[in-house]
Image: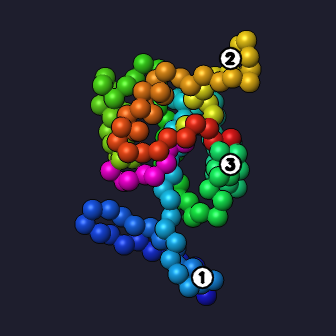
């Protein structure tokens, strides 16, 4: 029997599930989004982020056997852009909230190595503002992808 994904639409939310022939039950799929740096995206194809997600490696390893669905792979709107001054960015983030994304991962490129201590990383201040907005709206934020 082939596993098929089905989508039920309820008045307030969309529930994704996968019918499991092994367990004879239903498992809820956790909705994941990844936010990348706009500047870095000009030279990066997100292959490291996608590999880590698909293989449940690095920052995605803690999910274990949970069913995951990548619902968004987006960039910030560039340095200096915040929800207060960029309606396009606010619209993108509000869409994640509207779609009830469970967890947003901040891509590896959204933080930089400390020059004095390469083991320490500092998250971009614009990304911090994005993360704060998402947290204030009930979305869990995780730093890192790969």
The quadrant where residue 89 appears: top left
Image coordinates of residue 132 in percent, x first then y, are 41, 32
In the image, farthest residue toward the top: 116
The N terminus lies in which quarter of the figure?
A: bottom right
Q: Which residue is mark 3?
A: 52
Instruction: Describe residue 24's horizontal placement relative to residue 54 as left or right.
Output: left
Front-lying residue, 34 or 28: 28
Tell me the distance, in whole angstroms, between the alpha carbons under discs 3 and 1: 26 Å
Front-lying residue, 91 or 116: 116
Within 10 Å of disc 3 (Cα), the crowding (few <14, some 14-19, many 20+) is some
Residue depicted at 56% across the width and 85% down the height: 24
Image coordinates of residue 129 in percent, x first then y, are 42, 27
Q: Which residue is mark 1?
A: 23
Secondary structure under the numbered disc 1 in the rendered image: loop
Span shown in magenta = 98-105
The quadrant where residue 86 appears: top left
State if disc 1 and disc 3 touch (CB < 8 Å): no
Instruction: Describe residue 37's horizontal placement relative to residue 9 as left or right.
Output: right
Q: Which residue is mark 2?
A: 114
Q: Is residue 71 among the parts visible in the rendering?
A: no
Q: Residue 135 has which mark? A: none
Secondary structure under the numbered disc 3 in the rendered image: helix
Secondary structure under the numbered disc 2 in the rendered image: loop
Image coordinates of residue 141 in percent, x first then y, are 50, 41
Q: How many marks?
A: 3
Residue 129 sits above or below residue 14 on the image:
above
In the image, farthest residue toward the bottom: 1
Q: Is residue 119 among the parts visible in the rendering?
A: yes
Front-lying residue, 96 or 129: 129
Which comes sooner in the sequence, label 3 or label 1?
1
Which comes sooner in the sequence, label 3 or label 2?
3
Which comes sooner in the sequence, label 1 or label 2?
1
């Amino acid at each position: 029997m082939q596993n098929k994904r089905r989508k039920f639409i309820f008045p307030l939310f969309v529930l994704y599930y996968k019918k499991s022939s092994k367990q004879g039950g239903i498992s809820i799929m956790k909705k994941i989004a990844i936010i990348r740096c706009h500047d870095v995206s000009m030279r990066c194809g997100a292959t490291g982020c996608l590999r880590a997600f698909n293989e449940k490696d690095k920052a995605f390893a803690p999910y274990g056997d949970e069913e995951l669905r990548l619902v968004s792979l987006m960039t910030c709107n560039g340095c200096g852009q915040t929800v207060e001054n960029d309606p396009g960015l606010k619209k993108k983030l509000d869409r994640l909230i509207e779609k009830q994304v469970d967890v947003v991962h901040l891509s590896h490129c959204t933080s930089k190595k400390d020059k004095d201590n390469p083991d320490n990383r500092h998250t971009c201040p614009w990304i911090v503002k994005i993360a704060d907005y998402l947290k204030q709206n009930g979305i869990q934020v995780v730093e890192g992808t790969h």
